[in-house]
Structures are given as structure tokens and as C-alpha cells.
Image (tube, coloured by chain):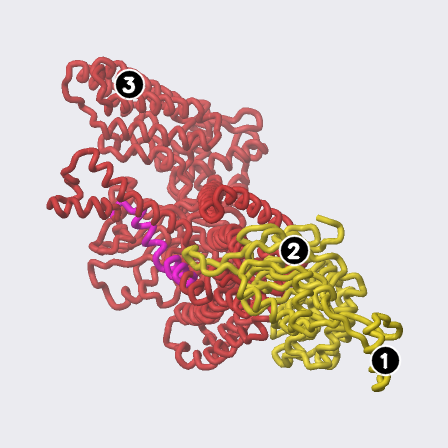
Chain colours: A yellow, B red
Amino acid sequence: MSNDAVIEIRNLSKIYRDFWGRKKVQAVKSLSMDVKRGEVFGLLGPNGSGKTTTMKMLLGLLFPTSGEMTILGKSASDVSKNERIGYLPEESYLYRFLNADETLDFYGRLFKMTAAERNRRADELIEMVGLGKARRRQLKEYSKGMARRIGLAQALINDPDLVLLDEPTSGLDPIGTREMKDLILRLKAQGKTVVMCSHQLADVQDVCDRIAVLFQGELKVLGRVEDLLEVRNEMQMRTSNLSEAAMSDIRDVLKKHNITEAAFSRPRADLEELFLRTVRESGERPGRRFTTEEIAGKSGGQA
Amino acid sequence: MDFDVAPVTLRDLAESLKLWLILIGILGASGLLISMLLSVARNGVAGIGIFFKGLLSFLEDAGSISPRRVLALTNLTLKEAVRRKALLVFAVFAVLLMFAGWFLTDSNERAELQVGIHIAFILQTISWLMLPVVFFLSCWSLPEDIRVRSLHTVVTKPARRIEIVLGRIFGMGIVILIVLVAMGGIGYLWIVRQLPLEAKSQLTCRVPVFGHLQFVNPEGQPSLKGINVGDVWDFRTHIQGNTRARGVFVFQGIDDSALVMETKSAGDGSGTLQVQGLRMECRFESFRTIKGSESSIREGLQAQYTLSNNPREEAFGLFSQSETLRPLADALRDAQFRTAANRLDELATKVSADGEAAKNKQPAELQPTDYMGLQLGAVYAAGVMRYRKDADLESAMLAFQKVAEEGAALITKISSEAEDKNETLPGLHEAFAQSLRKLAAVLNQEADTLYEHLPKLEVPLPSFHVAEYHEGAAQNVKFVPRTVRFSADAETQSRFLASLFEKLNEADQLVEGDGLKFDLATQLQSEGKISAENSALVVDVLAEQLASGQLKVAGSKLSVADGRRWFHFFDSLIQKDLLISADDEGWMMERDLIKDLTQEGHLRVEVSCLNEQMYLGMARPDLFIRKPDRSFMVGYGKALVNTALMMMLIIVLGVTVSCIVKGPVALFFTFTFYIVGQFFHEFMQEILYSPTQQGMGAIASAVMTAQHRNPQIGMDVSETTQRVVQGIDAVPRAILWGFSQIVPDFSIFNSAAGFVENGFDVPFAETVVPAFLICLGFLIPCVLIAGALLKFRELESK
């Protein structure tokens, strides 16, 4: 494993079978990718594309049919890897009869944490997720947003090196969403690696360094967000107070290819656009993976 | 219910451990083999590697169990049970207790039955209320966690799945313990407060020591059973009243710890005093051949206990099994060793004659049963003598042993089918005859020594009335003071006087000048506790003997003129009726119950019926020594411990099954286990091991039915076919055996309650320890199996 790869996946496949061992569906097909240390990595794909299956295989909730995975240098089936992992499930699958304090204390006890450490960490996290006033209430009384917050707190109880977030902004209001994204960026700033699955493409675009797009279990797109959203066959210029005369001059200037004061850049597609196009193309040309250049070129063409 | 449980020995435990290891080995090997085959079926050859990788990973998990995480998971389970209101079962319990008194308390009922009903109600209620809670908690908890995915968050932490299993089991165990302690405490208070005053004295835990029972028939011969008076239920057999018939109970392990203190009124009316003694409790059955008067029916039959320390009966009793040997047996038991020697010589002659008869192929005079009786009797006699570790008995012991050895060789040959039988038999007969003659010679030579070293002491106790209609169990409890005072028989009398005179002679207190000491009668009264009349009688008789030269004075000592021991001297006086008691009470003596009447902790109690034409029925558990009672709370606590262990076992089974199937299926499986283990375990054992139940299997039965044949005749098929049929029939039998070993015997857990309900202490080693070991025996493999099932289960499997 290279030093800066936190997750390495090689030829990972997952076939769901029925009771008699007959194949029902292949959820993941020969997936290979790496997640690098300190980056925020987004797993995208439509429903049933295999992104949650991949994440659950990483966590040991599902077993791969074939292929290999290493997380933090250890096999996915090795429970000790969980010492350095934090996981926020899609919905907060927590014990609803516990209150926030008890929840964090319980999960803290599963790590090598002293009582003092657990208490300090619980106070910090409850403060961070804004549940100070509700810390003594049982989780069954929590709203969905509150449940997401305590779910996030439990994922961070052990101050993990790798954080796996399944739909982190699901159920959060705009402010909560903003705070979640800020938190992800803060985690990144602390040097932690974040892997997230999300349907909220704008959120992914805002926080992810790299993304992978899965479709029907196959990896379709993998690359840096910046590179993927760049439209390479177009240029754009931005300026202010542009009069008619100036416009005329610009045209002249452009005619002479002599541009001095205008800011030039390539326009960007948004992630939603990229996502939809990938899905459409994958449907038309199954089994094909797209390069960053292809994605970038086509973005321009379509824009 | 039988309260006379066989003691659990270390050998039993070792056997159980061995069987457990074998079963675990078979289960483990089968499980691993099936897992590997499944892995290969799914992954091809690579499956072998995957299997071993998984196995290593599991072993690593099992080896890195963290008490901290298990404790956290235990705590979680505890909170879950409390917050999901599993403890509501208390409310039901409270409601039941509030109204139970209306139906249970009947002051007209016998006290011990009232106690039994109240205890049974509480213990049964606790058990039946707990069962549904335990079934649902254990079978539903994990599947529900998996269904709502709260377990997923836990397994993404460093918690090993085996730790989750342990946490569940311990957590639920603690819940059950809390509930049981609370319910048990409330139940105890309820019993104590609810019972009528007259029944409260019965609220105790009797600690019984049961003995072995054999009989003496009306002719005075040992017998394994008494008389059957026509009962279909042959649990008890009867002894005939006013005959030599006895029920002989031999108790083991009787020492000072068996004694109890009882308050008695002082004879001089000065108040009460504490007396140490042995308490015996009986529950004999009366059988009347005549109706008797109303008062006699009310009083019950009259019975008598006789405490006996009789090594001669033990050593020579077996000879009387054969009619021919009975004169020999009687002579030996009566210490008539010279007569016995003559009998042996006669028998030796017959044995030699039988040898000659065998050579000439003529019928033998002695029957095989006579030979077997001689051989077995000799084995037993040698054994008892060896057991007494008395050097003076050694030559007799060796002679009996030689008879036993030669007898064994002869009997083996007699029963053999060897062709050279008739040639070798005369030699063996002669060797056996020689051994008998040698024994006769030893008995002749050692007769006095044997008589002296095999003393018989019989202490008849005052007779009592057996409460026939259970008008109070206390009537059947008899207290025997440690120092028993009794009217001695001739042998005891002579032994007593001999030992007393030896002691006084040793201290130079018999002789004064040429005659007996003038205050000898007073000495005898104070030293020997002999009555004044009898003391005076002894002194008079001894003075006569001294005058007639039978006794002589040498220095300060008195001795028998012909050199005999004092013991033989007094014996001859008694034989001549010179020492017939001058006191109406007879020769009253005192003996220590433990020192004088037990031999290596064995106490022999003979029960006789004194009413003519009446019969007293008894079985082994009908008479027991009642050691100091324990507090009711002790037995009650043990019964609750057993209930807790049963619940724990159900939890273990429920959690294990729920690791692989959903809640309802787990519940079905666990409940089935419980029902089979509770109600059908004995039935399975019967099918497997009882000779009356051993049929020939389904296929064999079908073949025999088709052929119109029965099991005695068997199938009319070739040997090969027969083997095939038997082989096929062995398969379901093997499955049933396996099933009977895997399904725990739940009845062991309930047995403790039966003891308490009937006023007995729960024998710890025989009831609580096996229950604990069964629980542990299931806990260890179940945790491993459950841990493996959960580890290799895809929690998110679709």
C-alpha cells in the first residue's frame, strides 16, 4: 500500500445471492480505486449503483464475493481497523432508549478510552453538534435532524483518522447542512480522511476533493472534482461596468487576439450536470469508463 | 419425588467431563468440516484458504475478548431490558400474590402440606412468569437489533461479535438475577407472613442422611426384600409384626456432625437441659390384617428401633443365602466358631466327595448355589475382616480369602464348557476342600480371639407408635440421646463386666489383702454405673468364685485361676445363670452412640414391628437420620439459584439461535428445546437405554410385521440382510442419542424446588452443582458457536 492511500480497493465484486446460493444481483463489479490520506472523497451514483454496498464492505457489514480491500493498512475483515474509523450511517441506527450522554458513553466504552476521556469527548461533541439542551432526552424523542447530529457525534467519539459518512446531510436543514459541510472541511483541515456517499450533489461539489461515480456496480468516473467539472473547449471572461463602447473595443481586440485586462477562465459545469450525463452515457454505452478528458470535453460541448 | 439422590462423585464428574469433551469435539469437527465444504462450494479451491483465514480471524477475536467492551454491552442490555419494561413482570407477580392467599390458605389442611403448597406456589409462579420474559428477551433481542440496524453501528466499532454475544448473555443474566432476587425476596416474605402460625414450625430445611435397606425375614435370615402384602406398587415391602423380621437400615457418614441438640426436661424437675443426640425420622406404612380397636388405629402400629454394631452379621450374613450353608451361617453369626468349624469340615467332606463324583461323572451332592454361597460368603467375610484392620483377625481373614480364591477357581471350572472339565474338577474340588479344612482349623484355634474381636452390641430403643394417618410429621421423629441407656444382653454384659474388671484390676482396686475390696460394690456403682442391686450381686458371685478357687489373688491383683481372660470368665458365669439381674430394669448400661455404635461412620438401625398380625412397610427413603436442620432460607435460596441457572441456560440457547435466524424462528427453536428437555428427556433416555423399551427399530419391525413374526423370533432373512436392516435402524437411534446429548435435561433445574416444597434441604453437590455445570457446559460452546455465526453472518445481507 502506498503511504498516502488510506483505502485501497482492488477488483472488488459483490454478488447478492438467495437462500439457495443462486445469484440475485451483482451489486459491485470489479471495482478498483484508492482514497488518499487527508482528502474528502465522494462516492456518487444513482440508487442501486453499489456505493452503499461498497461502503458496507469497507466496514465489514458485508463480505466481498471477490477482490481485496485494505483500510488503514488492514483487511476490511479485521475488527481492529475500527479503532481508527468513524462511521455515520445513512440513518441514525442508534439505541433509541439511550439519551445522548449514554449513547456517547456506550460507544466510547467500545474504544480504549478512559471515563475522563469519554466524558470530555462527549461534552465536546455534544457542544459541537448543538445538542446541549437535549443531552438527557432519550433518542426516541429526537427529531430526524437531531438524530443525525448525535449520529455524527458518535462517529467522531474516537477522534478517527478515517470518517465514513453515508448521506451526511440527509435530514438536515440548510443551516445544519452548512454546518455539516463546514465540519467536513474542518476534519479535512485536521488531516483526516473523509469518504462520503451522497445524493446531495451540490454538497459533494462543495466539499469533495475527488469523487467516484458508480453505475450499476461499475466505476464510471474517478477524479478530482476540479478537473472533472472543467469545460476545456470554452473560455470565459468576466469584468464589470462594460459599456457599449467598451464592448465594441473588446470585439476589436478579440479580433486582433490582443486581450489585456479581461479575466479568462474555462466555464464549469455543475456536478449535477456531470452526474446526469454520466448516468445517461453509461446507460447508452454499458461497461465503458470515462476519462477526465472525455468528461471535460463533453462538458463544454454540452454547455 | 425421590429425595434420596445418589451422591455425585469425582468419578461422575470426570465421566461427564469426558463425555462433554467428546461431544464438543464431534460438534466442533463437524461444524468446521461443514464450514469448509460450504466455503469450497462457494469459492472453489480458494475456499480452503478463505476458510482457514476466517478460522484464524475468529480465533483471534475469541482470544482478544475485552472485559471492558463486554461490560459496556452488558450494561447496554441491562438498560434495554429495564427501559423496555421487561420488569413489568413484577406487577403480574404482585397481583398474583395479592389474591393467592384467598385460595391457598386452608387451616384445616395438614401443616406440612400447607407449607408445601405455599412454597410451590411461589417457586412455580416465579418460574412461569420468568419463562416468557426470558424466551422473548433472548430470542428477540439480537434479531431486533439487526432488523433496526442498531447493531450495525456497534459492529463498526472495535467490538468483536463474540463480545456482543457475551454482552447479551451476561446482560440478560443480570436482569434475570435482579428480577429473581426481588421476586424471591418478596415471595419469601409472603410465605412467612401468609402461613398460619401452626404451619410455620414446618418451614425448615431437613438435612437427611439416607441409608441402605436390607431385610431379615421372619426366620431371622437376611433377605433383599420384605413381604409383599399385595400392593401393585412394590416400592415398599413389609416386615411381619412380632417375628424376627427386621428392616435393616445402614447409614454411612454418621459422626458428631449428625448430632442435634434438643431441649429436654430435667429428670428431677429442675427445668430443662440441652441434650445431644441423633434424630431419626420415618414414614413407614402400616398394613393391618385385623382391624383392631379404634384407639389402636388412632395410636398406630408399634415399632422399635434397635441400634446394632454387629460385625459378625456383616461378615457372615451372606453364607445364609444357601439353605445348605445356613447352619454354618448361624454358627458364625452366633460366634459359635467351633461349631462352625465342624460344619466346615462336613462341607469339606462333601466337596471332596463331589470331586470324586465329578471324576466318575456322577451327580454332585452340593449344588452350584452352595458353592457360590460359600465362595461369596468367604469373599465378604475376608473383606469385613480386612476392613477392621485388626491384626488378631488376620489369620482368619487369610483363611477366608483362600476359600474365596479356591472357590472362584472351582466355580469357574464348574460353569465352563471345557472338554477337560471332568479331569480337572476333582483336583479343584480337593483344593477347595483343603481350604475349607484349613479355615475350620483356624476357626477352632482362634475361636476365642474371634469372639473377642468381633463383638456384637445391640441397643434396643424404646418402642413407639408409627403415625399411620400423618397426624403430624413430628410424631414420626424420634430423638436418640448420644448416651444411650439400655438393657444389655448376655454378650454385652460379659464384655462390659470384663472391661470394667480389667480396668479396676489395673488400678489395684479389686483386692484388699486376700479378699475382695470391701467397697467394691460402691466402686462398681460409681465406675460402671451399675445399679446397687446388681453391684451387690456381682460382688457376692465373685466372692463365691474366689472362695471356690475359680479366682485367685496374686499380690494386689485378682485373676482367673485357670488363666482365662475376664471376658470368658464372666461369659461362663452368665451361661451358668449366676448373673441374672437383681434389678427389675435388667442390666442397664450406657453406650456412646458415635463411639460404640458406629463403625467407620456406619450406623446400623434395625426396625421391627411389635404388633402381631400386623405388617410395617418400608422402602429405602422411609427412614433417615435428620442432621441439624438448615434455615428454610438456605434451601429456598438454592431453589432460586437453580431457577436462575435454568433461565440462564434458556438465555444462552435463545441468544445462540437468534444469531442466525429471526426472532420468531429463534423462539420456536428455543421453546422446542425447552419442552423436549423438560418433558421428554427421560423418555429419550428410556428409549435409548431401557431394556423394556428396546425394540428392533422401524425397518426391522416393518419386516417382522410383513413376515408375521415377533421380536423374540426375529426376522426371517439372511444374515447380510439382517445386518443391513440393523444398520439402517441404528441411524435414527444414533440421531436420537445425539439429540438427547445436545438437549439439556431441564428437569434437573426444577428438582431443587421439589426438595424445598417437601421440607428438605437441597443437596448442593447433587442438584445445584450439576445445574451449574450443565449451564457452563452449554455456555462455552454456545458462545463460540454464536460468536462464529454472528461473525460470519452478513448483517446487511439482502
Q: Mark 3, residues whose alpha carbon is within 10 Å: few (<14), some, or many (≥20)?
A: many
Residue B20 x/y as whole percent: 47, 45
Secondary structure found at label 1 = helix
Amino acid at pointer 3: Ala
Say which mark, if any, is on residue B433. 3
Question: Is residue B590 toward the left or the right of residue B439 in the image?
Answer: right
Say which mark, if any, is on residue A33. 2
Q: In the image shown, does B260 or A174 lie closer to the viewer?
A: A174
Residue position for label 1: A249
- Regarding residue B439, the answer to whether it shows in the image is yes
Q: Residue at x 48, y 71 (%)?
A: B200
Nearer the viewer's eye, disc 2 or disc 3?
2
- Residue B514 colored magenta? no
Q: Magenta segment, which residues?
A: B670-692
Toward the bottom, the furthest residue is A244
Q: In the image shown, does B188 or A156 lie closer to the viewer?
A: A156
Say if B669 sits above or below B609 in the image. below
